[in-house]
Image: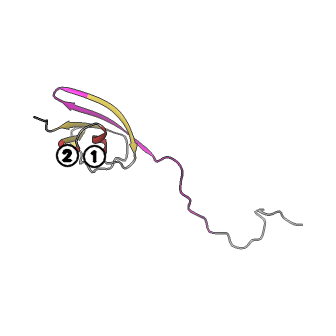
Amino acid sequence: MRLHRGSSKDDRGTTPATETLPLSASPATVRVSVEVVRGGRSRRFDLEVPTGTAVRAVVRSAGESPEGCAVLDGETPVPLDTPLEGPIRLTVVPTFSGG
């Protein structure tokens, strides 16, 4: 009896090495809720950014200069180079104004 090509019962010897193929799926994203507070006013918006995006990039997306802002998660300061790994709510407080 002959087995057709590709049969699991075919005696082909060793199994070929598996290949690592790149994934074509979109990168995972993180939901970021941002509130920019300035002089008693605030503006809020939500962003979806790729996982690992730095807080600095989120501040820029909010239209602020990262070096001139304090960023808080609740009451805790967040360094600008912190990569975002999960959903977070950030408060951006500009620390200087033009004159």
- In the rendered image, the quadrant that contains the C terminus is top left
Residue at the spot 30% in from the left edge and 30% down from the top edge? 44
Disc 2 packing (10 Å; few <14; some 14–19; many ≥20): few
N-term-proximal mark, 1 vs 2? 1
Report the label total.
Answer: 2
| x and y, in percent, of residue 27 in the image | 46, 48
Residue in front for this viewpoint, 99 or 96: 99
Whether 5 is drawn above or below 47: the answer is below
The residue tagged with tag 2: helix, strand or loop?
helix
The residue that label 2 is drawn on is 67
Which residue is the extreme one toward the front?
Answer: 99
Pointer 1 with pointer 2, Cβ within 8 A? no
What kind of element bears circle 1? helix
Q: Amino acid at mark 1?
A: Arg
Q: State the residue at coordinates (31%, 42%).
A: 58
* Residue displayed at 21% across by 31% down: 37
Q: Nearer the viewer, residue 33 or 74?
A: 33
Which residue does the numbered mark 1 point to in the structure image? 56
Residue 38: x, y in percent?
18, 30
Question: Disc 2 marks which amino acid?
Answer: Glu
Residues in magenta, as a range: 17-42
Q: Quadrant of the N terminus?
A: bottom right
Residue sticking out furthest to the top: 41
Label 1 CA crowd tier, 10 Å (few <14, some 14–19, many 20+): many
